[in-house]
Image (tube, rainbow, N blue to C red):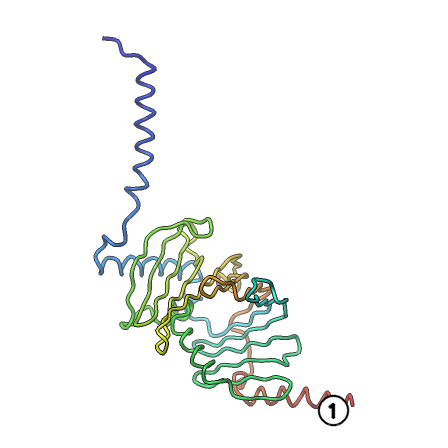
């Protein structure tokens, strides 16, 4: 019996389409069907790929950083409040100094459990609420977790499934502890973080907040892949955007750079210049 070639062609075409449609289903793994230990292992393996892509041992062992760029806050209406020059210094694991103008006349400085602010009236301690918020965010900040908490027994790790994030194929990883949950989207092709989402519950009010950070425009600086554009959203509303123009790692900084004395010296120098002008 002769078989119509056109019929065979249609059958082959339909079969091919069916196979193509089924292949993604076969490759996609439902995260809810994975046993907890296997899910944690898969999550850690993806995070290790991210660490390797970011710079491996160089990324993990970086001592400090110095980045300069432009910073913009967004108003509640969604409009940009204007760009200002920004310089941010970090010393791992918990020191941060942010200078908000070229002359460094406005500075916020966090050093462990202490913090100060410098403005045109002098140096003062940062409010307790600001310090609490800083430490709560730091505990689950992506870089801090990757460098310091991968073996923390107080955290749980879970594979969150595959997704398309910012037009890129990605895998979600969930990292959590009581009252806090950090989700990181890692690109499948380059293994670089695309987005981090921190879900946090206020212990006083019981309300949940969501802080999302988008990472784009990576540049290789001193052996470390650095996102030159960061955008922050708070519960769906954009609150700031940073365009980094330069970054350096393991730079030489004064020994007292992250102290109140350094801010008081900076104020004294600027106050002296103003006195001379008069």
Determine whether 235 is above or below 268 in the image: above
Residue 228 screen position, x and y as percent: 54, 61
Give the quarter of the figure containing the N terminus: top left
| Residue 246, placed above or below residue 118 | above
Dot 1 surroundings within 10 Å: few (below 14), some, or many (20 or more)? few
Which residue in the protein does label 1 denote? Answer: 275
What x and y, as percent, mark residue 146? Answer: 38, 67
Say left or right for 257 vs 18.
right
Residue 276: x %, y % from top left: 76, 90
* 172 versus 132 height, above or below: above
Picture coordinates of residue 261 (x, y %)?
Answer: 56, 90
Between residues 135 and 244, which one lies in front from this camera angle? 135
Considering every residue shown, the one lying at the far right of the view is 278
Check the picture and name the quadrant holding the C terminus. bottom right
Residue at the (34%, 67%) spot, across then down: 181
Q: Quadrant of residue 25?
A: top left
Asked where in the image residue 264 lies, by quadrant, the reply is bottom right
Q: Residue at left 57%, top 68%? A: 73
Q: Quadrant of residue 141?
A: bottom left
């Amino acid at each position: 019996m002769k078989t119509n070639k056109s019929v065979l062609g249609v059958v082959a075409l339909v079969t091919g389409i069916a196979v193509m449609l089924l292949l993604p289903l076969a490759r996609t793994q439902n995260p809810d069907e994975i046993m907890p230990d296997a899910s944690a292992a898969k999550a850690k393996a993806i995070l290790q790929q991210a660490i390797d892509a970011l710079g491996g041992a160089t990324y993990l062992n970086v001592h400090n950083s110095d980045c300069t760029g432009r910073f913009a806050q967004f108003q509640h209406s969604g409009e940009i409040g204007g760009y200002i020059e920004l310089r941010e210094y970090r010393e791992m694991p918990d020191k941060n100094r942010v200078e908000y103008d070229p002359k460094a006349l406005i500075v916020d400085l966090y050093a462990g459990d202490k913090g100060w602010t410098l403005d045109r009236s002098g140096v003062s301690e940062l409010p307790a609420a600001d310090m609490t918020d800083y430490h709560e965010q730091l505990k689950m900040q992506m870089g801090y977790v990757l460098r310091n908490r991968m073996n923390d027994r107080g955290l749980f790790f879970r594979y969150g499934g595959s997704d398309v994030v910012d037009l890129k194929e990605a895998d979600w990883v969930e990292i959590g502890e009581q009252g806090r949950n950090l989700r990181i989207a890692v690109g499948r092709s380059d293994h670089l973080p695309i987005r981090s989402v921190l879900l946090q519950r206020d212990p006083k009010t019981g309300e949940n907040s969501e802080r999302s950070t988008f990472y784009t425009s990576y540049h290789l600086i001193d052996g470390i892949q650095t996102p030159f554009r960061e955008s922050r959203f708070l519960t769906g509303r954009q609150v700031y955007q940073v365009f980094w123009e330069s970054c350096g790692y393991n730079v030489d900084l004064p020994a007292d750079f992250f102290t109140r004395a350094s801010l008081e010296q900076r104020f004294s120098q600027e106050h002296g210049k103003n006195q001379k002008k008069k």
